[in-house]
Image (cartoon, rainbow, N blue to C red):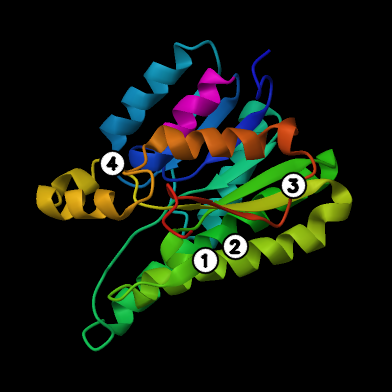
Amino acid sequence: MKLLEGKTAIVTGASRGIGKGIAKVFAEQGANVAFTYSSSVEAANELENELNALGVKVKGYQSNAASFDDAQKLAEDVVTEFGSIDILVNNAGITKDNLLMRITEEDFDKVIEVNLKSVFNMTKAVQRTMLKQRKGSIINMSSVVGVKGNAGQTNYAASKAGIIGFSKSVALELGSRNIRSNVVAPGFIETEMTAKLDEEVVKGWRAAIPLKRGGTPDDIANVCVFLASDMSAYVTGQTLNVDGGMLT
């Protein structure tokens, strides 16, 4: 029996990196997947075809998670197309790193809007469906940076810490309706984005991690499968650090 058999999941920001890994593992575990992307049409089409081949229903939607109206429309479209929304993974995110003295107001606002307000938008958009179903699992992607902070990332850290407070509050509000809300805080995950970094810098980071390696998108996706499945039926309001021991 696949762990997510017959469930429908929305995964935001899934055309690459961690989001793509989550969409892929969810489909392998039997979930029907609606995923969003902002601009990578080609990558989205490729992913749609690849995952549909697994015998589940998968559809990509070009949608801006930072837009309240886009989120509402997406939720409506997914219910019409798939019939339910059992799982929401809020993964869409950006960085605009800089020291506080150099960061612009625009760069601060943009990161908060895409990373944090999108979580409000999407959670509010799926809430009605989940309340009707009297079940649902919401998984919000934070970061170790949201737990411990990081120089040069005040905007990113604030957005990712905000996600933790938001998720705990949702867990308290919706628990009586069997809707769970949890957070995954990834550490150093090796994706297309990190592949562009200087190899020596990356080696230094790996050496500082107790497990002596960077994580993979699958490492995050597997934890998300647990939180999305009935195996975690009694887990809500929690933050799982998936970081190879960085925060130990």
Instruction: Examine the rendering and report whether any part of residue 64 can be seen.
Output: yes
Real-space Cα distance between discs 1 and 4?
Answer: 24 Å
Under mark 1, the amino acid is Lys
The quadrant of the picture occupied by the N terminus is: top right
- Residue at 49% from the left image edge and 26% from the top image edge: 25
Real-space Cα distance between discs 1 and 2?
Answer: 5 Å
Q: Secondary structure at mark 4?
A: loop
Label annotation for residue 191: 4
> Magenta residues?
21-29
Real-space Cα distance between discs 3 and 1?
Answer: 24 Å
204 w.r.t. 20: above or below: below
Mark toward the start of the polypeptide (4 vs 3): 4
Under mark 3, the amino acid is Val
Residue 210 part of the magenta-drawn span: no
Real-space Cα distance between discs 4 and 3?
Answer: 28 Å
Mark 2, Cα crowd under 10 Å, few <14 / some 14-19 / many 20+, is: many
As rendered, which of 195 and 169 lies closer to the eye? 195
Label annotation for residue 235: 3
Real-space Cα distance between discs 2 and 3?
Answer: 21 Å
CB under 8 Å between discs 1 and 2: yes
Label annotation for residue 117: 1
CB under 8 Å between discs 1 and 4: no
Instruction: Examine the rendering and report whether any part of residue 198 can be seen.
Output: no
Which residue is under mark 2? 120
Position of 102 with respect to 156 (left or right) is left
CB under 8 Å between discs 2 and 3: no
Mark toward the start of the polypeptide (2 vs 4): 2
